Image (cartoon, rainbow, N blue to C red):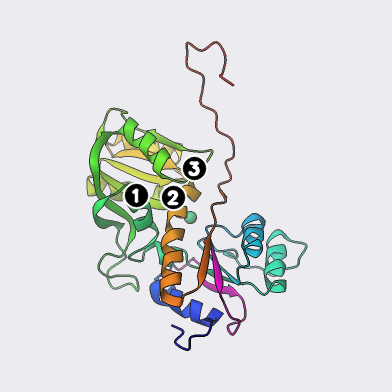
Amino acid sequence: MSTTGSAPTVADVVAALDRRYPPAWAEEWDRVGLVLGEPTTGVSRVACVVDVVPETVEEALDAGADMIVAHHPLLLRGVSSVAATTYKGRIVHRLIKADVALYVAHTNADVADPGVSDALAARFGLTGLRPLHRPRPGSPPDGPGRGIGRIGELPTPMTLAELTRHAAAVLPATAWGVRAAGDPGRMVRTLAVSGGSGDGFLAEATAAGVDAFLTADLRHHPAGEHLAAGGPALLDAAHWATERPWLDDLAAHLRDELGVETVVSDLDTDPWTVHAAAPRPDDKEPRP
Ligand SMILES: [Zn+2]
């Protein structure tokens, strides 16, 4: 923490974020921490984004941000060039030329307490929160309350159909919206949520005995087989919409800890931009 009263530096922001989201908590395949930026550069405004794409970078630069904190890594796999002729190289050049630092907190923020799925759970008012997927005992992120996804009780039980409409209303708006799998009349009291791709946690949602599981990027065969085996109902939201709520928590923490200004991106970076519901059988043609 900066105690001199002067503006914090990139190194101060990194230290504060590394304390809340230790890089050692990230999955082995993940790439987190400072991506680019001079540690000694002063930071008065931080932009919080899910994805580092040209649109969110321009938005951050327009807002006068000195640093971007992102959820998804810009550079996950090995690269041998950041030439400005490449998509990601162009972004790297844009940021370095503008002297804007970039920091990533990904699976280390998923597993933290509070973490990405706490912010998602808060949108539903879930209580009695517990992790859906706990870290391996003795592994770096192992600890009370930590783990990926959250399980909790809804303030008011509702049917799957009602919960799907409710989810579309309380999550950030996207073209994708929310779709659900299972009996629309099934009552849901206990809900599991996991920000981002939650395909890998279907068995854990079943083992936890929840009524429904909301996540993103669900696929035909795993979802179908999960339901056929009697697993909880599934809600499939837009990936971006499940992680965007965390940005508010991240920004509040940066303001409290460092006194920096923050801007939170509401730019929907979900790749899906069009959604059409099939016309009802009694409709002659789709409504305009
Ligand atoms: Zn994600």
Q: Rate crowding at label 2 as few (under 14), some (14 to 19) or many (20 or more) other CA atoms within 10 Å.
A: many
The residue to which callout 2 is attached is 242
Image spot of residue 114 (x, y percent): 34, 64
Q: Does the beta carbon at disc 2 come under 8 Å from ligand 1?
A: yes
For the question of whether residue 119 can be seen, the reply is yes
Q: Does the beta carbon at disc 3 come under 8 Å from ligand 1?
A: no
User: Which quadrant would residue 76 be assigned to in this image?
Assistant: bottom right
| Amino acid residing under circle 1 | Val
Q: Label 2 to label 1, Cα distance in Å? A: 9 Å
Q: Earlier in the sequence, mark 3 or mark 2?
A: 3
Q: Is residue 162 above or below residue 59?
A: above
Secondary structure character of the magenta stretch overall: loop
Q: Are marks 2 and 1 in contact (CB under 8 Å)?
A: yes
Q: Which mark is residue 193?
A: 1
Q: Which residues are magenta?
A: 28-47
The residue to which callout 3 is attached is 173
Q: Residue visible at 27% across and 64% down?
A: 145
Q: Label 3 to label 2, Cα distance in Å? A: 10 Å
Element under disc 3: loop
Tell which of 220 and 115 is nearer to you: 115
